[in-house]
Image (cartoon, rainbow, N blue to C red):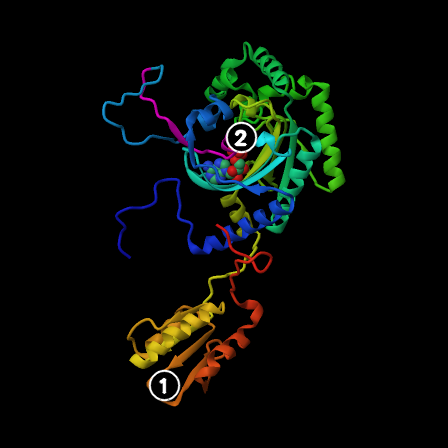
Amino acid sequence: MSEPLFRTPKGTHDVLPEDHQYMTYIKKAVRHRSRQAGYKRIDTPMFEYRGVFERGIGAHTDIVEKELFLVSGPRRKNQEVHSSNGEEEVEFALRPEFTAGICRAYIEHGMQQLPQPVELYSIGQCFRYDRPQKGRYRQFHQFDLEVIGLRDPSLDAQLIYVLTKILSDLRILDRLTLQMNNIGMTDNRIAYMQALRDYFIGKERHLPEEDARRLQTNPLRLLDSKHEDTQILLKNAPSLDQSLSDESRQFHATLLEYLDELGVAYVHNPRLVRGLDYYTQTVFEFWDSSSGAQNAIGGGGRYDGLIELLGGNPTPGVGFAGGIERMIWHMKEAGVTVPNKDQVDVFVAQLGPEAKKKCLSLVAQLRELGVHALGALGEASLKSQMRLADKFEATYTLLLGKLEVKEGTIILRDMRAGKQKQIPFGQAIPEVVELLGKQNLDTYVLRDGIGGVDED
Ligand code: AMP
């Protein structure tokens, strides 16, 4: 193999065909379960005005402060755009997540006029300029579900239920633990953040540098700090629980009751806060049961203030985002196999110009019927074409040499059994279809209600 001149940029990866089998499977489960529950698909741009994320997610969150991929177009002549701090202004940012963009779309398209709640889902790439490490990329895929327009714990419960269905379809639910918490409304949080700051007066110097800084900018994040020193100091700190209003407590208790009713297992985790500013009340994550916090496959929560922050009327919402790469990893770890739809059913080998011509239309007709057919490629000998059929792991080979053309026959070879027989040329297609079985044909129907079309 030659050394490539370029490789994928750090933190990105090619999704090769083998992983696409998993990716497609996950997308199918998401589409199916979302559709069943009344969610409609939305695609927002992969980049937005950076303010969408800065205002929505919060200027002092890791995602915005350290991980936002800023993008700008070519500078036009005489264009000088500077922000208030004198630095060159970059207008756009690649989306680090979906929620803020979807809420921007909800406002922009007047979706408050629609029957509420508006349920939307999306699947696609997200970008974070994070330090790449295992399970943490700079470009990765998420699927995302949002329920906007009403505040009721039954909506949180129904959303979580749909997610458990998707994870169970992927056969990884039993590897995960649902962590639940309620972080209160904004005023509860402000009161709690002040209480935390007060508690740490005189103790700041014992905090690791990162957490000392967070104490000023985003003290809630201390609760899920990875630093042991911080966790020890937190043992006697006031708990978030104590700052919650009766309404929040009631909301959480009712939500947990609904989850019990739906048979969803969870763990109440008073330390769970999530890394984005827009959350109010419910927060939840699905953690890898074996290794814990740092390996969440997805998370979400309620964001009753976000739409207002982005310029809309006060509108509640609840949503979730799941990391597709991490789900694929779990599926592989759990030994989940997914159907391979890229198999070669028939390889057509030929010799001579007449045979080649006939094979071209034979391949085309087989494909039309939903048989994955390859062949009539070049001028190679029959022997080397057979070797190729082997390498493609074709189930059957059809062989057409000069003699068969003359006789109006064709040879059908079962590659696994290593057996072959000569049949009339006109029999080739019905025989192959029969052998493969009608139910295994890859048919594609664009009409309503019949068959399915693979979406992206
Ligand atoms: P978050 O909203 O940040 O919790 O992200 C939701 C989910 O997306 C996480 O639980 C991960 O599964 C996935 N995710 C977030 N960031 C990354 C990343 N940098 N690389 C891969 N997956 C990620």
- Give the alpha-carbon distance from disc 2 to disc 1, as whole Å: 64 Å
Kindly identify which numbered label has been placed on residue 405.
1
Left or right of 427 on screen, residue 190: right
Q: Can residue 431 be seen in the rendering of this structure? A: yes
Q: Which residue is the extreme one toward the bottom?
A: 407
Q: What is the three-letter code of the residue carrying label 2?
A: Cys
Image location (x, y in percent) of residue 438: 56, 71
Q: Residue 313 occupies which quadrant of the picture?
A: top right
Which of 244 and 269 lies nearest the eye of the viewer? 244
Q: Quadrant of residue 158?
A: top right
| Element class at badge 1 | helix
Residue 89: quarter of image: top left
Query: Please, is residue 269 above or below residue 191 in the view?
Result: below
Is residue 107 one of those drawn in magenta?
Answer: yes
Q: Is residue 322 magenta?
A: no
The relative height of residue 350 versus residue 119 in the rendered view (above or below) is below
The magenta-colored residue range is 86-110
Q: Could you tell which of marks 2 and 1 lies nearer the N-terminus?
A: 2
Quarter occupied by the N terminus: bottom left
The residue under label 1 is which amino acid type? Val
